[in-house]
Amino acid sequence: MAGISDSNFINKMIPYGFNMVTLGGYNTDKETIEAGKEIIKRGRKEFDVSEEDIYNHINSQVNNIKEFNGNNNCNENQNIFISANLRAITPEPIIGISKIKNLDVVEINCHCRQEEIVNLNCGQGMLNDMDYLNDYISQVVKKSKSYVSVKIRANIDGIDTIAISKMIDDVGADFLHIDLMKPGVGQPDLELLKAIRNETNIFIIGNNMIQNVESANKMIAFGADGFSIARGTLNGKLNFNLNQIKTKTFNKDI
Ligand SMILES: Cc1cc2nc3c(=O)[nH]c(=O)nc-3n(C[C@H](O)[C@H](O)[C@H](O)COP(=O)(O)O)c2cc1C
């Protein structure tokens, strides 16, 4: 969550049993950083880090999480993946950040719907052009030193979420992180999840409205391999036990 999910926030969540945590989203190039400043001006939270500092900043955030882990504040057998959610108008900054030693996953943000980002054809705006998206993700997959996740939003007017999901699988990304938001419904679109499951083999992280064991189990039952929680962690606590939910183990050599 932009402006919220830094290492201190994440370190409070790790003891609840998460096996992947996501830093960011971060704006990583001149254009998205400028857009982020405009977003802040209208009162929304963003991380505001300069282009020259972004690599070192994420590196120190990652190390802060690693140190916390090493201090045994959580289950020492808990093998936690650290991911960073990144916005960039070209693949290069993401490829660069993938070289951070202890960063396990770079996540391409094709989800942000803030106007300033979408106007750059970034975030959710990337979903409008399948060829462009294919080329962008392919370049990251080819050159990344970390695993690659692609975060998308479902059910955008005029966008074929299933076709995009298949493409993300075909180009070799490691994770499809999908916000299954269905406008006007207030529930994740589990039928769409099921359809994507039937058409892909990629590790799917299902997202949207996970608030308890029941909603998490439903996400898994409809085909997600794992799930993610954003707003359910906003008060720095999780009010249910993650150990009660059986997710798949991600297992792929890089
Ligand atoms: C304050 C806030 C900031 C967010 N920032 C980001 C972001 O930077 N990158 C991203 O991919 N999603 C971002 N999201 C979206 C969430 O990660 C998630 O996809 C969405 O809130 C639905 O999941 P939930 O129902 O568990 O909250 C943000 C959500 C909130 C509420």
Image: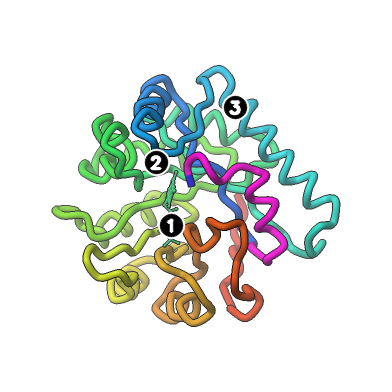
Start-end of magenta stretch:
2-18
- Please state the horizontal and vertical placement of residue 115, each as a whole percent of the image: 26, 36
Task: Measure the alpha-carbon separation of dots 2 and 3.
Answer: 22 Å
Q: Residue 133 sits in which quadrant?
A: top left
What percent of the width, then of the height, locates residue 230? 49, 57
Q: Earlier in the sequence, mark 2 or mark 3?
A: 3
Q: Is residue 121 above or below residue 157?
A: above
Task: State the residue at coordinates (20%, 57%).
Answer: 160
Q: Amino acid at mark 1?
A: His
Identity of the amino acid at label 2?
A: Ser
Look at the image and say whether residue 35 sits in the magenta stretch. Answer: no
Residue at image mark 3: 55
| Residue 90 appears in the rendering | no
Indicate which disc residue 177 carries.
1
Q: Name the spot of residue 45 as percent of width and height, x first.
A: 45, 38
Numbered mark located on residue 138 in the image: 2
Q: Secondary structure at mark 2?
A: helix
Query: In the rendered view, does 152 fall on the left or right side of 243?
Result: left
Q: CA distance from mark 1 to mark 2?
A: 17 Å
